[in-house]
Structures are given as C-alpha cells and as structure tokens.
Image (cartoon, coloured by chain):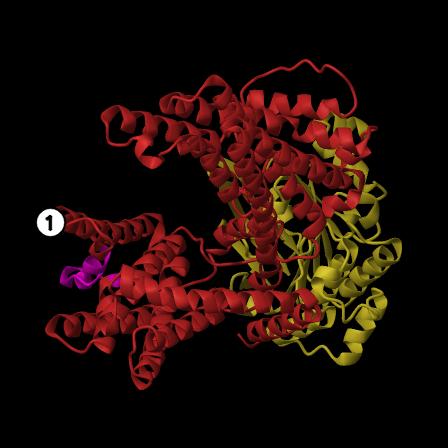
Chain colours: A yellow, B red
Amino acid sequence: MLQIMDLSKSYKKTLAVDRVSFTVPDGQVGILLGPNGAGKSTIIKSIAGLLRYDGAIMIQGIPSREIAAKKIFGYVPEIPALFDALTVREHIEYIRRAYDSDITEEEIQALFRRFELDDKQDKLGNELSKGMMQKVSICCALAVKPKVILLDEPMVGLDPQAIKELKEVVLELRNQGITVLISTHMLEMVKELWDIVFIMDKGRIRATYTREQAGNQDLDAIFFGITRGNAGEKAESGILEPMQESTRESAGN
Amino acid sequence: MKALLYVSIRSFINRMKMRLRKPLTYVGIVFWVLYGLMMLNSFDIIFSEAGNMTGPEGYAVVLSFFIVWSIPMNLLAYARKRGLAFKHSDIHYVFSAPISPKGILLYAQSKTLLAGFLLNLFISIGGVVWFHISPVKMLLFFLVSFVVETIFEGCLMLIVFGNEFLGETGTKVLRGFIWACVIAMGALLLSQMFTKPIALSLIRETLAHPLMQLIPVIGWNIAFVRLLLIGPNTLNLICAGMYLISAVAAVLVALRMKCTGQYFEDAMTFADEYEEALKRNKRGNSMEKASKKKKFKEAQVKYRGTGAKAIFYRQLLEYKKSRFFVLNYLSFIMIGISVIASIATALGVFSFDEMATGGAQVFILPGISAYITFIFSSTATKWTKELQNPYTFLMPDTTLRKMWYSTAMEHLKAIIDGCLLCVPLGVLMGLSIIQILLCVLIYVCLQANRLYVGMVCDGILAPLFGAAMLSLTRLLIQGFIMTIGIIGAVIGAVLGGPEVGFVVLIVIAFIFAVGLALLGSIMFGRMESLENY
C-alpha cells in the first residue's frame, strides 16, 4: 500500500503541491493524471525520495525514506539514465546486491526475453537507445521484486511489443497483490489497467475515482470533464462527481 | 555499500577495457609520459631556483600550498551542496536504492579517491626526488598523511554536505566560518606584504608562518605536515594535536549525525549542471558557462533575405535582446587592457617604448592579438548552438551558406573586439591609421582561424579524441598556423617593411581560415553533427 498524507512542496515561492493526500491499496493500480504543470512529477519525485517535502509518504506503512521502505519499492523514472560503463546484465547485478533481491538467474533471463534484451546483455549503458534504456529501467525495477512500484510515463519510447508486455506485467503485479502507481498522459494505454485514478490540477487532487464509480465512463472523458469543465458542465455531460475527501482517504482501507 | 563497490569496480574495469581497445590511448600515454618527464625536470628548477625551496622545510611549504588551495575550496563547495560528482544514473539507481545516504556521499567522494591517491603518491615521490628526503620518511609520511587526511576530509564532507541538524542558518554560519579562515590567511599574507619586499618568497614565508598553523583545520593540517616532515616543536605539536583531535571528533559526529537523504534534491540540481559540464568538456568547450535562464530585453529585427540568411538575422535578434548586445567577456578584457594601458602610460608607470625598441613596437599589437587568440582557443562561440538545432540541417540551402551565415556574426564581433583593442593602443603607440587598420584585420583573421579550427576539431576530430587530446590538438593546429603566419610576416617585414609583413600575415591567416571553413562546412550537411552537441 502506498499512502500520501498531506504532501506539500514549494520551489522557493511557488507552491507546486498543496496538501495532497491519496492512497493506493495493495493489489491495485493507481493512475496519476493531470495536465502539464499539475504537480505530478513533484509527487513522483517526492515518493521516490528525491525531494524535500512537508507531509508523510508511507510504503507498506513504513516512512518512505527508511531503508526498509526503499527495499520494497521499485521506481521507473520518466527519463532513464543508465550507468555509462555498466552492461545491461551488470545493472541487474547491481540491483540484486543493492536490494538484496532473491531474483534468480532464470527469472532474470525470463525478464530479458520478455523485453527482448537477451541479446543486449553485454551492451554498455551508453551504447543503448532511449527505448532500450527504458526497458532496462523497467527490468531493474522488477528485479527489486517490489511491494510498491512507481512508473513515471513508462510507455514513452517503448515499441508496441514492449508496451504490450508492460501492460501484462502490470496486470500480473496487480494479481500478485503489488501496489502500482502510474503517472502518464497516455490515457489510451492505461484504460484496461486502472483501479483507481487521481486527477490533479494546479498542485491539488481535483478528483478521485475507482473503476466501480466510473462505470462505463472512459478515462479521457473523466479527465477532460474535470480539467476543462466546471461542475455544471460535468453534471450535464453525465460525468460522475469525484469522491469526497473522506471517501478518498478511505479508498485504500 | 557492497552494491556501490560493485558499480565502482565494474565501471573501472569496463572503462579500462574500452580505453585499451583504442590505439589513440597509447599515443596519449606516450605523450603524457614525455610531458611528465619534461615537467619533472622543470620542477627541480622551479623549486630550487625560483622559490628557494629545498629540503623538508621547502617540501612542507609546497604541501601547505596544496592544503590552503584545496581544503577551503572543497569545504565551501560541500557547504553549497556541490563538489560531489553525482550523475543522472546515480539519481536513478542510487538515491532510490536502500543504501545509507551517508554511504552514497562516501561513494560520490570515492570517485576522486584514486586521483587523490595518485596525487599523494606523486607528491611523496617528489619529496624524495626534488627535496631529497629519505624514502623511509616519505613512505611513513605518505601512509600517515594520506590515511588521516582522507578520513578527516571524508568526515568533514559528510558533516558539511549531509548534515540535517544545522539547517539553513547553521549552514550559513558554517560557510561564514570557512570564509573567516580564508580571510585570516589573506590578512596574514597582506600583513607580510607590508613588512617585507614583494617576491615569490613572500608566499613561502606566509605559508611557513607560525600564525598560519593556528588557523583551525587548515592551519592545523599544515602543522601536522610540518610535524611529520620537519620534526616537533611546541607550536606544531599543539596544532597537530588539535588536528588529530578534530579528526577524531569529525569521525564521531559523522557517525552519529542524522542523514536521511535531504541533500538528494540539491544533488539532483548539481547533477544536471555536472552532466552539462561533462558534455561541454567532451566537446572541448570547458570554458563555456552553464546555460542559466537569462533575462532578455524586447527587440525586433527585420529579416532581409531567405534561406540560411535567416540564421544571421535570428542571431542578430538574440544579440539585440542581450544585455550587452554583441559584447562578451572577451570584449571587456579588451576594454580593460586598453584602459589600464592608457592610465599606466598617462601616469608614466608604463611605456610602450620600454617594451620594444628599434621599430619593433609596431609588432606589439599583433603579438597581443595572437596571444589572446591562443589562450582563448577553447572558448565556445555562438555558432555551435546552430548545430544543436535540427532546423539548421533541414533548412533548404547549401552547407556553405549555412556555415557562413552561422558564423558571420562572429566575424562582426571580432571586428568590434579588434577595434576595442587596437584603436586605443595603436593611438597610444603612435601607429599610423593604416597600421592600426591592418592590426584590426590581423585580429579578425586570427579569430576566424580560431573559430574554424574549433569547427574542424569539434565536428571532425571530436569523435576520435578525448577532451584533453582535443584541446591539445586545437592548440597545436592554432600554433602551427600562427607559426607559419609569423614566419611569413617576418620575411615580409624584412623585405618591405612592417605593413608588408602585416599583409603577408593577413593573407596567410585568411587562406587557412577559408580552407578550414570549407572543411568545417561539411558539418552543416550531416545530421550526425547533432549527436556531438
């Protein structure tokens, strides 16, 4: 379970995230949506422990900055950056050691086959294309065997086969009870994956929906209804009202 | 930490393998060995003759210089959450990993450990070779000083960079304290300047001054070095004791202090700058500054013409929006030289007649132009930005025109800078209008050479060479052209007077510039050039 509680973050005088709270329960896929500048990246970086912030972030009930929380947390950043002088295989070996992961050789090879990296294992980080780097980044996050995984625009740069595999991987993770949070603009790509969606705008969560609440509504209809329209327009278009603060908090419980 | 050790070792091995596969590595090794041998020889002269620094006393002064130079600089960088080489890969794979934030800081510092070890080794061998200190003493010194200093500096880095108990105000106080130490050292040097004649020995005497050893950390380190090399006296025993006590205290504080990784945010910002600097260094533009968000004025420009001409007018618009139009730091150096020379001449402190006699005065300006061109040969110019823009390649025009309109503004800038340098100084020297004009043209041609040598090096040679070799090659080509030009100018001057010599120099520099420009224009025709920028 991933819990964000009263998260606020300012860059000098600019308030990027304003008292944001949400929860993604175990075995659910959460989607973080929002227009450019909404504050998604700030939330993602805060969860990954890269920023200073006010509030609290818990991974399986453990404060996210603690080593125990980091051990069960996988992260795929928007722009992958590999170690220049490490091979693809050595990246996984680093992850295995850093996270004390019990991933087996067979599992590593299966991951490589799945993302078509089996013939690239000896390539150095600086010899790979952006798409390949993204695949390595995803494999590394999976090699952690995380309980919570955070994917920031994971489909960008991937070929159709890799996108298909990634979607399957996300569903498999969900079935294994792992918490997944995806931040993306590619609504079409996540329409069959999501369980709970958080729509952000101007540093705040404007609405939270579960799949049951959305019913037959498309993600893009929900998204544009919240970010473009006002309450009256939403009612006319038949868009559901977002969850209230109290129900938002309890969504994960 | 074992994971970070794995990354460091594997990266080192893989890099070595990559380098040893390139034949140019071996050429580089031979060059640096020869250069090192040459330097070894010249150090002997510098230390014994110029500085009068011999024996353990002289050696202690040299080491003190390193201490004074490096410790405040490093500590100030750490206090600003800089100075540690984090890369984007570290942010991605290390910051989010279950590794102690203190361990991550030590990992970042360890990247310079090998260089520090080699430098210490070199310095220790130097102690035996140049200062004739016994090898046993130097070995003991190396072991003790390297171990103690590395641990102490590592702990200071942890405390200054990673602390979460000082807060913003505390960090400011710490920075103030380091500056106070630097100011104290400066004040000591100044006080020496007032009491003793100004010479190189002044620095030596300041560094060896008893008061210097009283300055916290920096001075105590000097006392520790003096104790090991020269032997005990009351002052260095007390100060070296303070050094060891503060080292132990630093270890204890570093071990106990809380560090949860609050510094990650600052390190991320610095990583962006560091990666940018690495890119610039790779293409040999180490002097180019990091691109910060600049403020621009309102301006307009009327585009006259189509195709590649648009590049020229766009650059003109950018310059019009800039604070100082086409003037940059080089222009201000020119203005500075002119102003200082004018004031000095007016006050009678300096005279061009003393600088050169027998009609040689007329060659001073071309000499200054050549010197400026040579020392600023690595400075980036605005045209390189054009190669970062895909539209430069997509534009429907010839490569030659694209190259010309991308660089035309640089020539205009060179004319302005040349005038700023040559007109005031030429008038002061009493040169004729023709001579001044020729001097301006020489400056413009030499700058054109610099520009096109850079273009050829960046575009054609950069993929083959490392940064150091690229800078060296640039200097060598530039030096070669200047040598040919100077030989031609001397012959011309002997046969037909200085004006003829100037014209010969201009013609030679112009021919080289055109040839290099034609060669460099290839870059504007292939999109691969984008990858180098």
The image quarter containing residue A239 is top right
Q: Secondary structure at mark 1?
A: helix
**Looking at this view, is B109 or B517 the one in front?**
B517
Task: Looking at the picture, tell me which residue is in the foreground, A225 or A50.
Answer: A50
Residue farthest to the front, as pictured: B495
Image location of residue A201, percent across then percent down: 64, 36
Q: On the rendered structure, is A210 left or right of B181?
A: right
The amino acid type found where label 1 is placed reads Thr
Left or right of B218, for residue A6: right
* Label 1 packing within 10 angstroms: few (<14), some (14-19), many (20+): few
Instruction: Give the labeled residue for mark 1.
Output: B195
Inspect the magenta stretch and tell me whether residue B293 lies in it: no
- Percent across and percent down for residue B458 are 66, 46
**Residue B352 drawn above or below residue B173:** above
What span is colored magenta in the figure?
A: B203-218
Of B362 and B33, which appears nearest the observer? Answer: B362
**B378 in relation to A180, above or below:** above
Specify the quadrant that holds the C terminus of chain B: top right
Could you tell me which residue is drawn at 81 percent across and 36 percent down?
A: A221
Q: Chain of mark 1?
A: B
